[in-house]
Amino acid sequence: MLVLDENVPADQRHLLRKRRVHFRVIGVDVASSGTTDENLIPALHGLPRPTFFTLDQNFYRRDWVHRGYCLVWLDVADDRAAEFVHRFLRHPFFATRAKRMGIVARVHSRGVQFWQCTRRGAQKVEWHYE
């Protein structure tokens, strides 16, 4: 299940829908609007293996790595959020829900930096251009 933070602009959500990316939105489908970061974590635990996308850098925390979900900070301009959600989901390292679980990631123009349950240090991968 893909979940978008309420801070992802409506036009970017529309672009994802046009690409047939199915997701839920915080404040609409999951939790209450304005829910604090710390209270979103328990809400994510209640969902079946979610991947959560946000424009909020506060979610890029090593101590929030958990096998039951994936947290993704989109460290890009708001008007490019849909593009980078799509790129992240198509990257071979993150292309399936099983591969994403247990990851806290920072997505940016050069690639992805991330922590993983199964590894000690931070890792990074670059974008593959097609």
Image (cartoon, rainbow, N blue to C red):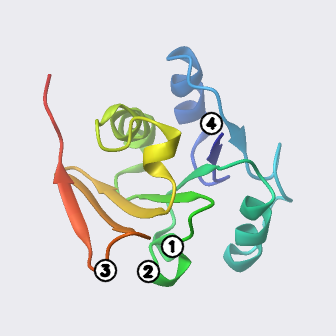
Residues at circles 2 and 1 in contact by the CB criterion of under 8 Å: yes
Mark 1 neighbour density, 10 Å: few (under 14) some (14–19) many (20 or more): many
Image quadrant holding the N terminus, namely top right
Seen at 81% across and 50% down, the residue is: 30
Residue type for callout 3? Arg
Rendered view: 25 above or below 23: below
Q: Position of residue 3 (x, y in %)?
A: 65, 46
- 94 left or right of 43? left
Q: Earlier in the sequence, mark 4 or mark 1?
A: 4
Q: Which label belongs to residue 120?
A: 3
Q: Earlier in the sequence, mark 3 or mark 1?
A: 1
Q: Which residue is mark 1?
A: 65
Seen at 78% across and 66% down, the residue is: 34
Calculate the distance from the C-alpha at mark 3 to the C-alpha at mark 4: 36 Å
Seen at 67% across and 74% down, the residue is: 37
Q: Position of residue 61 (x, y in %)?
A: 46, 79
**Depth-wise, is mark 3 or mark 4 nearer the camera?**
3
Which quadrant would residue 13 be assigned to in this image? top right
Mark 4 neighbour density, 10 Å: few (under 14) some (14–19) many (20 or more): few
Calculate the distance from the C-alpha at mark 3 to the C-alpha at mark 1: 11 Å
Q: Earlier in the sequence, mark 2 or mark 3?
A: 2
Q: Position of residue 27 (x, y in %)?
A: 80, 52
Q: Which label belongs to residue 10?
A: 4
Residue type for callout 1? Val
Calculate the distance from the C-alpha at mark 2 to the C-alpha at mark 1: 6 Å
Q: Residue furthest bottom?
A: 63
Rendered view: 53 above or below 58: above
Q: Earlier in the sequence, mark 2 or mark 4?
A: 4
